[in-house]
Amino acid sequence: MQIVITKDYEAMSRSAAAVIAAQVIAKPDAILGLATGSTPVGLYRNLVAGCAAGDLDFSHITTVNLDEYAGLDGTHDQSYRYFMNHNLFDHVNIDKANTNVPNGKAEDPDAECARYEALLKKLGPADIQLLGMGHNGHIGFNEPGDAFIAPTHVVELTESTINANARFFASRDEVPKKALTMGMGAIMRARRVLVVVSGHDKARAVKDAFAGPITPKCPASILQLHPDVVLVGDEAALSGLLEAGVQV
Ligand code: F6R
């Protein structure tokens, strides 16, 4: 694993964006696995700037997103489709037909998961998969549990995740209780994984994931088995890992 430690959120965003930018430049028809949440917002801002400057060309890029809330339409301002359009796709020269997010409004969520999994298999492994991390160690919406689940699946969100995401909704009651998420299979098949973390509130989860046992109780710990992980985090988020003696 490669660990990049930065001073603060802005520096983390620039460094992580550079990793994605290098992929886009090296392979103009790359498949990018993308994430939502507050952590990658600055990274996306840097990619938008790179495209506006003429340094990055997304015209042949394909994207696959990790997850979507069940029950939210892509026009809902808290849906992950809306987030992606708003933070990246609307501002770069990507063909939206080549951007993929699970359909949260599908009548049959299990069938939608099967469709998405088949699509992931057809496209082949992501060249790079971007991940944020939940306070409970979740990646995508793979919540702590008794087993790592391989395919795209419907998940009941935990209290911890609902509480963390309530900040984006008018009230906690409005936070969807279920989501559709890429499973560990597609995440682990990605050729490279880029994990972004920021802030003291992530320090414990980062330490558990990368310096603790590999267990589905901390879903991100599975990444210890991936051959090419780049962890980019600010000093605050990586503080627990450094205290645990992990060398940077
Ligand atoms: C988002 C996702 C989640 C987030 C995680 C961290 O697509 O899959 O796993 O990456 O909840 O969210 P933030 O960045 O808001 O702390």
Image (cartoon, rainbow, N blue to C red):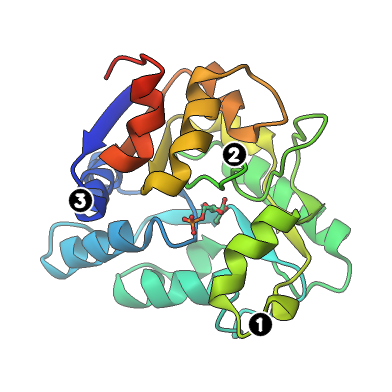
State which mark lies toward you, 3 or 2: 2
The residue sitting at 66% across, 40% down in the picture is: 121
Which residue is label 2 attached to? 137
Location of residue 45 in the rendering, given as x and y in whole percent from the top left corner:
26, 65
Q: How crowded is mark 2: few (under 14 residues within 10 Å), some or many (20 or more)?
A: many
Query: At x 36% / y 21%, what residue is drawn?
Result: 243
Residue drawn at (30%, 45%) of the image: 20
Give the residue displayed 52% in from the left and 45% down from the top.
Answer: 133
For badge 3, the amino acid type reads Arg
Q: Mark 1 points at which residue?
A: 171
Q: In this view, does 204 lie to the left or right of 163?
A: left
Residue 205 locus on image (x, y percent): 53, 36
Give the amino acid type for the residue marked by disc 2 in the picture. Answer: Gly
Q: Distance between the residues labelled 1 and 3?
A: 33 Å
Pick whichever of labels 3 and 2 is earlier in the sequence: 3
**Label 1 or label 2, whichever comes before in sequence order:** 2
The kind of secondary structure element at disc 2 is: loop
Marking on residue 127: none
Residue receiving disc 3? 14
- Name the image quarter holding the N terminus: top left
